[in-house]
Image: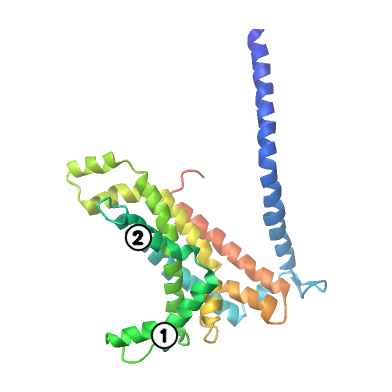
Amino acid sequence: MKNKGSKVKSNKLQNKLDRKAWLFVLPSIILVTVLVFYPMVQAFIISLKSGMGNNLSFVGIDNYKRLLTDSTFKKALFNTILYLIVQVPIMIILALGISVLLNDKKLKARGFFRTAIFLPCVTSLVAYSIIFKSLFATDGFINVFLMKINLIAEPIAWITHPIWAKILIIVAITWRWTGYNMVFYLAGMQSIDDSIYEAAEIDGANAFVKFKSITLPLLKPIILFTTINSTIGTLQLFDETVNITNGGPANATITISQYIYNLLFKYSPNFGYAAAISYVIVLIIVVLSFIQLKAGGDKNE
């Protein structure tokens, strides 16, 4: 009888704790539902309509069919995927390399270098874009410097040439977000016990072997996180293309997010078609995140 009584008391206590736990979680659930899930559902409903404001008319999947013949959308999609394929690997590798260097206890002024590399992440997007536009102008500092050291004979049209403009956008994104990823890798490296490296040194492992066999495997979850995070950020790229090149020349640098903005605020507003394009970003993010999780060997599925 005592066991039954104690079990009943234990169950009551557990139920009481569960109710209290739900009280703490409930505000977050409500906020996420109202601010995230509800707008997502509404956006999908709008993507099946055409027009703007109260004059939306149901058109079914016509907006999605239109994507197949829209040359501007195809260009924006190509540019966005190009930035993703080129910039994300460069940034991840660069952040890893820098974090390894700045994790060296023998390096003096480590704090200064860490702060200096992280600072771009907290600068204003508009401010740094304007500075980049000035630095890479035809008569800007970069062209003047390259000509003085005889690397180029004439100024490079960083902003007005289709290829160089894309390179400029990639350079700008890499400069801004490398330090952000570096912080995660540094935190991961500092949590690795020094005794593991010491044991490897006793076994004759050099710096490269220690990095490949110890650091990389232990940083795998963090690398996976930063890769997915960077993928999502690049697919939503907007500020740099708007403020540095304005999507030009001739839409050579336009991204999907900028095209959505143009459809809503620059061209004749079409909320339905803009919402349909936004769901393309959602679909790409879901697919790529799933692939990255599978490639990363996620054990918590």
Q: Nearer the viewer, residue 184 or 85?
A: 184
Q: Residues within 10 Å of mark 1 (few under 14, many from 20)?
A: some
Mark drawn on residue 113:
2
Q: Position of residue 168 (x, y in %)?
A: 44, 78
Residue lying at the far bottom of the rendered structure: 154
Q: Is residue 124 above or below residue 108?
A: below
Asked where in the image residue 174 lies, by quadrant, the reply is bottom left
Relative to 5, 283 lies left or right? left
- Residue 92 visible in image: no
What is the C-alpha distance between the residues marked 1 and 2?
26 Å
**Horizontal relation, residue 297 to residue 271: left or right:** left
Of residues 294 and 129, the one nearer the viewer is 129
The disc at residue 55 is: none
What kind of element bears circle 2?
helix
Residue 166 is drawn in which quadrant?
A: bottom left
Q: Amino acid at mark 2?
A: Phe
What label does residue 140 carry, if any? Answer: 1
Look at the image and tell me in which quarter the N terminus lies. Answer: top right
Which residue is at a point 71% across and 64% down the rendered structure image? 43
- Residue 284 in the image: x percent, y percent? 55, 64
Please provide percent x and percent y for residue 27: 69, 44
Mark 2 surroundings: few (<14), some (14-19) or many (≥20) residues within 10 A: some
* Residue found at the far top of this picture: 1
Q: Residue at x 37, y 44 (%)?
A: 191
Query: Against 37, is 67 above or below?
Result: below
Q: Residue furthest right?
A: 54
Circle 1: residue type: Gly
Residue drawn 72% across the image and 53% down it: 34
SS at badge 1: loop
Please tell me which of labels 1 and 2 falls first in the chain. Answer: 2
Residue 142 horizontal/vertical position (percent): 37, 82
Please state which of residues 108 and 237 is positioned toward the viewer in this rendering.
Answer: 108
